[in-house]
Amino acid sequence: MGYELTFWAGGDDLDPLETYRRLDAETIVGVRDVDADQLVDALATKLSGWTRSGERRDHQFILQPPGADPDGSPAFDVNIHPQHARFDGYGIEDGEDFNAIIDVMHSLGYRLFDPQVNERFG
């Protein structure tokens, strides 16, 4: 079973669920564009020991915490879009893996939206 974490910056006065639903389809005024290169750099720098598949500037890749099976889980399927970043976690049993992702994103000014509970966190 997977678990999704979605992040965006800005749009704090917008309805979070409505914003989440619209992010894949359109540009939303008030939501900041994602600096994908900065995000990829931060993940590489701040998640020491984590591995990723894909080319250096690829904005869709698999990210795995230390000790993960390279051909399996735990793993995050990462997709960086123009105004949001989505992390789909699979086989994640350690909450610290989720917290590590949240901490990196928060340090860059992105807030978490958890679509499983339809809530955006500060």
Image: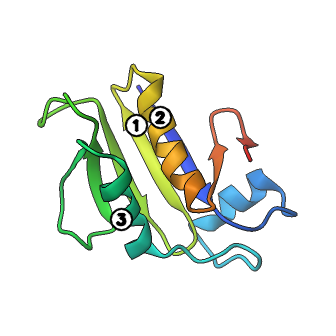
Nearest the viewer among 79 and 51 is 51
Q: Residue at x 62, y 66 (%)?
A: 23
Foreground mark, 1 or 3, reads: 3
Q: Which residue is mark 3?
A: 40
Mark earlier in primary sequence (2, 3): 3
Q: Secondary structure at mark 3?
A: helix
The amino acid pointed to by label 2 is Phe
Q: Are marks 2 and 3 in contact (CB under 8 Å)?
A: no
Distance (Cα) linking label 1 and label 3: 17 Å
Number of residue marks: 3
Q: Which residue is mark 2?
A: 98
Asked if residue 3 shows in the view, the reply is no
The amino acid pointed to by label 3 is Val
In the displayed structure, does residue 104 sit left or right of residue 56? right
- Residue 4 in the image, given as x and y percentages of width and height: 51, 40
Quarter of the picture containing the N terminus is: top left
Q: Are marks 1 and 2 in contact (CB under 8 Å)?
A: yes
Q: Which residue is mark 1?
A: 89
Question: Callout 2: 10 Å neighbours few (<14), some, many (20+)?
Answer: some
